[in-house]
Amino acid sequence: MTSGKVRMMANEERVTRGLGLFSIGLGLAQVAATRVVAESIGVPDGDSTRTVLRLVGAREITAGLGTLTQRWPVAWLWARVAGDAMDLALLGRALLTRNADRNRVLLALASVAGITILDLRTSLQQSRRPATARGRSAKEDAMHVKQVITVNRSPEEVYGFWHDFQNLPQFMPHLESVQVLGNGRSHWKTKAPIGKSVEWDAEITEDKPNQVIAWHSVEGAEIENAGAGHFERAPGGRGTVVRVELDYDAPGGEIGKGIAKLFGDEPNQQVTTALRVFKQVLETGQVTKSEATVQGQGPARPPAEKISAE
């Protein structure tokens, strides 16, 4: 990806999801509790008010669902901005209504104005996102993968193992090696067609001990890529929930197509298999032959050290 700012993208996605959930919640309230909503914003309750609120609520629910279900929901975000403008206009008219509670209407206006600013900012950010972060990329070989797995080890152990990037080739079959250079930088080497390899440097963009580590390729890399691992203690203390995001923007031509094929027709399935191996390495200290064979690695390589339970 062009920006390589995984942390920024993660924050933008959280805000986008939050806006989608907010839309659905607000819309449901406007449809199901019109009298309460009318009273809270200071407008007189009546048939016309209820009709308008239900229409606005239906719009909010639709926009929220669109925002949550689309990988690159920029159109729905701009629809929210347009809806905000409509709401501001309706509240402005409400101020002229004789029986309106002006203080509550003004408070509602201020609240909608604040949401409008957030919607506008998020819409602009999403519109500027690089092709590799948009679900369907403008480039044929761009890939975006998100997977989750629970590992029966503490966040400290899981984070510590992942934090040493030299461990990544043990469960990521496309990687030949990762060399840690220091100062948050590392050198990556991956398989390429016709027995060749592709190499690039990467740097850590976010590192919160036992919580998250994110990285991206440095400018000029032949394969623009980024990734992030999020580690959260599982409910009941039953291990760690690991959430992984990977973005690859392979070069064009035969090399790019070959690299894309390394992930198979289902890149999500390939990453799922890699995470299963990751889980095995941490939980048992070894990899079963069946899992290694699925990845095309042949016999499993022995781990450097068997990880013992706490």
Image (cartoon, rainbow, N blue to C red):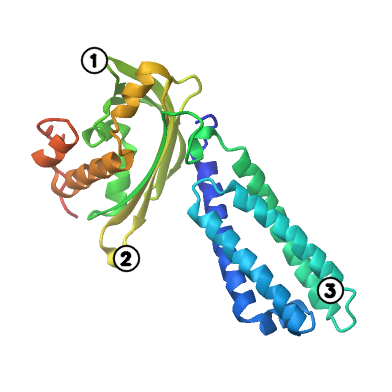
Quarter of the picture holding the C terminus:
bottom left
Disc 1 secondary structure class? loop
Asked if disc 3 and disc 1 are in contact, CB closer than 8 Å, the reply is no
The span from disc 2 to disc 3 (Cα, nearest Å) is: 47 Å
Q: Residue at x 32, y 42 (%)?
A: 268
**CA neighbours of label 1 inside 10 A, class few (<14), some (14 to 19), many (20+):** few
Residue 3 image offset from top left, x and y in percent = 55, 32
Name the residue nearer the viewer: 203 or 87: 87
Name the residue nearer the viewer: 28 or 288: 28
- First along the sequence among labels 2 and 3: 3
260, above or below 124, in the image: above
Asked if disc 2 and disc 3 are in contact, CB closer than 8 Å, the reply is no
Q: How many marks?
A: 3
> Which label number is shown at residue 290?
none
Asked if disc 1 and disc 2 are in contact, CB closer than 8 Å, the reply is no
Name the residue nearer the viewer: 97 or 177: 97
**CA neighbours of label 2 inside 10 A, class few (<14), some (14 to 19), many (20+):** few
Query: Visible in this render: residue 24?
Result: yes
Disc 2 secondary structure class? helix
Residue type pointed to by label 2: Pro
The span from disc 1 to disc 2 (Cα, nearest Å) is: 45 Å
Q: Which residue is mark 2?
A: 235
Residue type pointed to by label 3: Ala
Q: Residue at x 54, y 63 (%)?
A: 21
> Which label number is shown at residue 94?
3
- First along the sequence among labels 1 and 2: 1
Q: Which residue is mark 1?
A: 195
